[in-house]
Amino acid sequence: MSDYAPKGRLAVAELIVGRSISGAGAPAAGIPQSEKGAPNGVATLDEEGKLDAEQFGFGGIGDPAGPLDEGGQMPASQIPAATQTDAGGVRQMAPIADLSDAPTQQDFNDLLAALRDAGILATS
């Protein structure tokens, strides 16, 4: 796989250094081959200009527990809850009222309670 630098970024780099950059002077040339395409290294693109999933260097949130919806997404009921150690899925909490111009301690305690109820903030 060859080094890849999008035209836009290369043009910006050329503006910064004030000269044409190509070959050994290209930004990708300074990256060791061992880091290219390696997990937690520098990603390389395939022939279609996309990343290979093996290059991400982290796992997803797991396999869905059932069928995907018509858009290919996991239904909310299948998204794992977040814990202090696992990110889980992203969920939207119920809306809460805006605070007044002079928020009180009770306003902040109510906000914390709403965050705990939504599972965004740990209960202890």
Image (cartoon, rainbow, N blue to C red):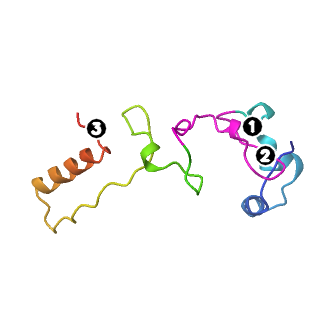
In the rendered image, which residue does mark 3 sit on?
A: 122
Q: Position of residue 92 (x, y in %)?
A: 37, 55
In the rendered image, which residue does mark 2 sit on?
A: 28
Is residue 39 placed above or below 68 in the rendered structure? above
Q: How many marks?
A: 3
* Amino acid at the residue labelled 1: Gly
Residue at screen point 13% across, 65% down: 102
Q: Position of residue 73 (x, y in %)?
A: 55, 51
The magenta-colored residue range is: 39-66
Closest to the camera, between mark 3 and mark 2, is 3
Q: Position of residue 99 (x, y in %)?
A: 19, 64
- Give SS at disc 1: loop
Q: Residues within 10 Å of mark 1 (few under 14, many from 20)?
A: many
- Of the image marks 3 and 2, the number of the one nearer the N terminus: 2
Separation of disc 3 and disc 2 at Cα? 43 Å
Q: Is residue 63 left or right of residue 10?
A: left
Separation of disc 1 and disc 2 at Cα? 12 Å
- Give SS at disc 2: helix
Screen quadrant of the N terminus:
top right
Closest to the camera, between mark 1 and mark 2, is 1
Closest to the camera, between mark 1 and mark 3, is 3
Is 48 magenta? The answer is: yes
Separation of disc 1 and disc 3 at Cα? 37 Å
* Amino acid at the residue labelled 2: Ala
- Of the image marks 1 and 3, the number of the one nearer the N terminus: 1
Q: Which mark is residue 21?
A: none
Q: Main secondary structure of the magenta part?
A: loop
In the rendered image, which residue does mark 1 sit on?
A: 37
Residue at screen point 77% across, 47% down: 45
Residue at screen point 58% across, 34% down: 59
* Amino acid at the residue labelled 3: Ala
